Image (cartoon, rainbow, N blue to C red):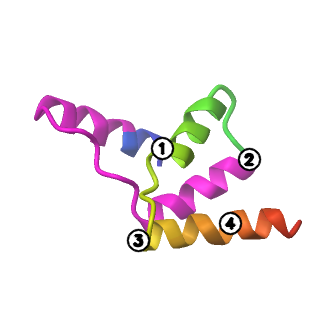
Amino acid sequence: MLQEYRKHVEERAALGIVPAPLDAQQTADLIELLKTPPAGEEEFIVDLFINRVPPGVDDAAYVKAGFLAAVAKGE
């Protein structure tokens, strides 16, 4: 997931545009990485979780909210 995202960022940068926000599947994959982050990728993963998941009523935001609710409940 991280390699694919970095490639996406490079492609968009070459076009002069910002990366697209994460979709629901990418957010779900990112959450799994948050649970057991690869060594050296912790800060990058947290940054993606904080800054690249769109807010509001997007499906990715729903996935993020579900994860945060589970964390808050200690699940």
The secondary structure type at the circle numbered 4 is helix
The secondary structure type at the circle numbered 2 is loop
Mark 3 neighbour density, 10 Å: few (under 14) some (14–19) many (20 or more): few
The residue most toward the right is: 74
Amino acid under disc 1: Asn
Label 2 to label 1, Cα distance in Å? Answer: 19 Å
Residue 72 in percent (x, y) is at 81, 64
Mark 2 neighbour density, 10 Å: few (under 14) some (14–19) many (20 or more): few
Label 3 to label 1, Cα distance in Å? Answer: 14 Å
Left or right: 24 as drawn, with respect to 42? left
Amino acid under disc 2: Thr
Q: Within the magenta stretch, is there residue 60?
A: no
Name the residue that disc number 2 marks: 36
Which labelled disc corresponds to residue 58? 3
Label 3 to label 4, Cα distance in Å? Answer: 15 Å
Which labelled disc corresponds to residue 20? none
Q: Nearer the viewer, mark 3 or mark 4?
A: 3
Amino acid under disc 3: Asp
Q: Is residue 66 above or below residue 15?
A: below
The secondary structure type at the circle numbered 3 is loop
User: Mark 2 or mark 1, which has the lower sequence index?
Assistant: 2
Circles 2 and 4: CB atoms closer than 8 Å: no
User: Mark 2 or mark 4, which has the lower sequence index?
Assistant: 2
Q: Which residues are magenta?
A: 6-35
Name the residue that disc number 4 marks: 67
